[in-house]
Amino acid sequence: MTGDRMPANGWLLETRGLTKRFGGLTAVNQLPLRVREGEVRGLIGPNGSGKTTTVNLLSGLYRPDAGEIYLRGHRIDRLPPHEITHHGVARTFQIPKLFGNMTVLENVLVPALAEPDRRGRRSMGEILDRARWLLDFVTLDRLRHAPAKELSGGQSMLLQIARGLMLRRILLFLMDEPFAGVHPTIKDTIMETIVRMNREERVTFLVVSHEMATLRRLAPVVSVMHEGALIAEGSFEEVANHRVVLEAYLGA
Amino acid sequence: MALLELDGIVAGYVEGIDVLNDVGLRVERGTITGIIGPNGAGKSTLLKAVFGFLHPRRGRITFDGREIHHLAPHVIKRLGISYVAQGANIFPQLTVTENLEVGAWVFRRDASRVAAMVDRAWATFPRLREKRRLRATGLSGGEAKMLSFAKELVTEPSLLLVDEPSAGLAPKIAAQVYARLLEARASGATILLVDQNIAKAVEISDYLYMLEMGQVRHQGPQPVFADQVRALVRNALLGI
């Protein structure tokens, strides 16, 4: 199959031979990652295994050196990040990236206001309703007029999540270490948000995390990377008993 | 009495978030004590707390019988503790010799002592001696890592704190770094080592701690710990 379309066969996301090199280092090496519609998938691996690079490739921040990325059968790997966003892919960053001088509410509005015209925008009323509902959901509504730069690390993570969910058509949400260094209460809010958006709006999640206990409650299936490659996939029980996975974590 | 003792250490960077949550740990003289654990477990924070980069909210750190948890890093360095941070922590625009002199900065008022220290460092690091007039930018990655060790060893510390010594290094260079640690122990130094490379840490340490979510999850002498390490990693993967 060549060209920009191929049958999706039930995969929301499919990468083929995805490769990214930095100088002599192959950070992502021929990665074949496939995620079904409606899944919450975990992506784990020892430090430096290529997880964040993968997220950066999927969201268009990096151009792959080889390979393809398909979203519902549409090839997206040559699109700029904002086009990939318009296709329904949102993401968060481990170190939150917000518009610091804009208010919390304005940050959430950005994806709606940046929508391309062609498929009929939502009305401003609808947009505001959704924004306020999302902010309320992530417990930030009372802070909506505060500049985003005044938020704590955990609150900034919540705001990134609300902002991503503001996309009119959100299919795939990529999260890079959403639980790292956040307060337990906020961790719970993030988990609740993932579970509810997955169930009610059928958003598919790909979550990179080192917090196994937390991730295990969310993701029935986890993909394991090591040295840029996919080395195992399955339930936590399956991968934790996988010899290659243990070796990878031992660093041997 | 152990050379270094941590007792009930609670520490963190941001209000309300404790990265270390009641950690106790002992480092016996003349040993390598290894700390392993997943990302975010608090391993690097523990080293920073010992070296005075952050002061614990609660708990006690004693070095050679003296409380040090309220002291500043330069004072701690004078007491005989050195800290080898991750990566090549050197001054690229200074020469190799100047880097060593900066390593001995806390003793700068005693020029002859510093000169003697630098001379002894050349004996341990002959390769750096060949390049002593070169700016550190001209060193290879491996040489730069060696210089960051030499710069901290120059004061002949009795306790060396080492954070991720092999991160980002080619296997051959990493092997040299671990060989240096064993040499340092052989010449009497005590080492507290944080490492992501679990296999290597278990291989060279005399006693090990596993940290998880800011707490000591497991500890034991090397032979016992080595037998359990696979089960420990499996449990960590399962989040149990």
Image (cartoon, coloured by chain):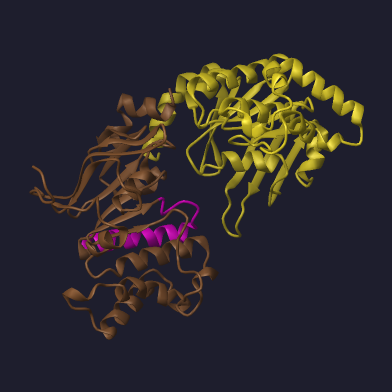
Number of marks in the rendered image = 0
Q: In the rendered picture, chain B carries what hue?
A: yellow
Residue A49 percent coordinates (x, y):
39, 36
Which corner quadrant of the image does residue A248 belong to? top left
Q: Tell me the residue at 13%/51% (across/down).
A: A4
- Rendered position, A243 above or below A42: above
Task: Work out whether residue B163 can be spotted.
Answer: yes
Q: In the rendered picture, chain A carries what hue?
A: brown
Residue B53 percent coordinates (x, y):
70, 46
Q: Nearer the viewer, residue A186 or B198?
A: B198
Quadrant of image for the N terminus of chain B: top right
Quadrant of image for the C terminus of chain B: top left
Which corner quadrant of the image does residue B22 belong to? top right
Q: Which residues are magenta?
A: A177-199
- Rendered position, A120 above or below B147: below
Residue B192 percent coordinates (x, y):
65, 29
Based on the picture, tell me whether residue B196 belongs to the magenta stretch: no
